[in-house]
């Protein structure tokens, strides 16, 4: 089921394994990005999901203030909504790999099991194995 669809992001609820899949497809701007994050949070709650797949292979460059907001506000909301495991598929662009890893490194892994992948199939396998 699709909870949000925009040129830069699609949020899916995948029945098998009860996983929320955030499929990044471009460069987000703040207002529509907020709507996408809200839809993702609602998908977690509606599906009682504990697993999140962040597919950032095609994510465009994000403003450092947006990255800070995601790390300080949205990730804690996602954890509070019930997410316990996150698989992150690395962006294709090296500059984005550095940016994504830098803000994800600040996550307290006592609250969220986080694993990085360069291959989406490996990410699905790992995530389906998480409780």
Image: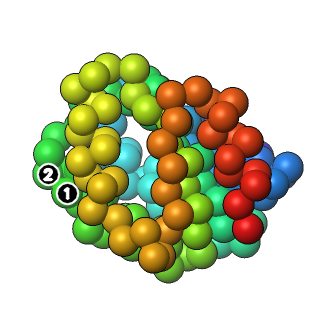
Is 92 located above or below residue 55 in the figure? above
Q: Residues within 10 Å of mark 1 (few under 14, many from 20)?
A: few
Q: Residue placed at 73% from the left, 68% from the top?
A: 131
The reply to whether callout 1 and callout 2 are in contact (CB within 8 Å) is yes
Give x and y (percent) for residue 105: 30, 56
Query: In this rendering, would 37 be left or right of 129?
Result: left
Is 91 located above or below residue 87 in the figure? above
Give x and y (percent) for residue 51: 65, 59
Q: Which mark is residue 65?
A: 2
Query: In this rendering, would 131 be left or right of 103?
Result: right
Q: Residue placed at 55% from the left, 55% from the top?
A: 86
Q: How many numbered callouts? A: 2
Where is mark 1, residue-wise?
Answer: 68
Q: Quadrant of residue 90?
A: top left
Q: Residue placed at 26% from the left, 52% from the top?
A: 103
In this rendered view, identify the residue nearer to me: 94 or 63: 94
Query: In this rendering, would 22 be left or right of 45?
Result: left
Q: Secondary structure at mark 2?
A: helix
């Amino acid at each position: 089921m699709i909870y949000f669809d925009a040129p830069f992001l699609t949020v899916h609820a995948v029945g098998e394994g009860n996983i929320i899949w955030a499929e990044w497809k471009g460069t987000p701007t703040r207002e529509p990005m907020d709507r996408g994050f809200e839809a993702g949070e609602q998908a977690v709650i509606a599906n009682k999901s504990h697993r999140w797949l962040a597919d950032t292979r095609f994510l465009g460059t994000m403003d450092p203030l947006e990255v800070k907001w995601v790390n300080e506000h949205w990730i804690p909301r996602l954890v509070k909504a019930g997410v316990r495991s996150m698989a992150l598929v690395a962006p294709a662009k090296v500059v984005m790999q550095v940016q994504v890893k830098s803000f994800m490194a600040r996550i307290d892994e006592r609250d969220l099991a986080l694993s990085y992948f360069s291959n989406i199939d490996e990410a699905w396998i790992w995530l389906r194995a998480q409780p």
